Amino acid sequence: FLLPEEEILAQLKKKRLINSESFIMKNNFIKIAASILILVSVFYAGKLSTKNSQENQQENLYAIFLYENDEFKVENPNELITEYTNWAIDLNKKGLLAYAEKLDVDNRNWFGSSTVKNVQSKLTGYFVYSANNYDAAKQIAESHPHTNYGGGIELIQIDKIKAEK
């Protein structure tokens, strides 16, 4: 007797549509990574003090967006999770981390022109942090371990829109 998920995997493997070992490893990695990143981000979001929030509003905010494609390889998911967690903890200790989230890449839709959509890579997560200037923000972005696994990082300064009174 197989559970529905196991039956589907067995059928896909039988038809040679998937390699079950890599599929299961990737599936387990995604579940583990999502759980850990959600836990870390919720924990540290709650730990941010009012002082850090006020500082973040006074300083420049930057966002890094994490992208993955078929070149993104993880041999040891626990190592990746540890590196990402330590990176976020270090940023938070310095009072720079505003928030971070792993994105659910399985539940997404595209709206608008298909010519704008990037089909090469998937946006899988983001971090928002403060820095004194773009060079400092760039140095922080370059220290993120995501590129060690074949991922890409995009750094964008958050443009503060001031409402006129």
Image (cartoon, rainbow, N blue to C red):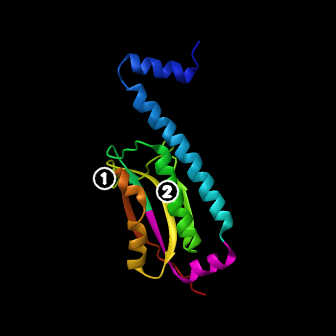
* Magenta highlight on residue 163: no
Question: Residue 29, how many percent across, how many down?
Answer: 49, 40
Q: Is residue 89 above or below residue 82?
A: below
Q: Is residue 48 above or below residue 65?
A: below
> Which of the numbered marks, if any, corresponds to residue 84?
2
Q: Name the residue rendered at 42%, 28% in the picture.
A: 21
Determine the residue located farthest toward the top in the rendered image: 1
Q: Residue at x 53, y 21 (%)?
A: 6
Picture quadrant where residue 138 is located: bottom left
Q: Residues within 10 Å of mark 1 (few under 14, many from 20)?
A: few
Amino acid at circle 1: Thr
What residue does disc 1 label?
115
Where in the figure is residue 146, as x and y percent of width and height?
Answer: 41, 56
Whether residue 63 sits left or right of residue 16 in the image: it is right
Residue stretch rendered in magenta on the structure: 49-64
Q: Residue at x 67, y 66 (%)?
A: 47
**Alpha carbon of mark 2 to alpha carbon of mark 1: how far?**
32 Å
In contact (CB < 8 Å): disc 2 and disc 1: no
Where, by quadrant of the figure, is residue 55 drawn?
A: bottom right
Name the residue type under label 2.
Answer: Tyr
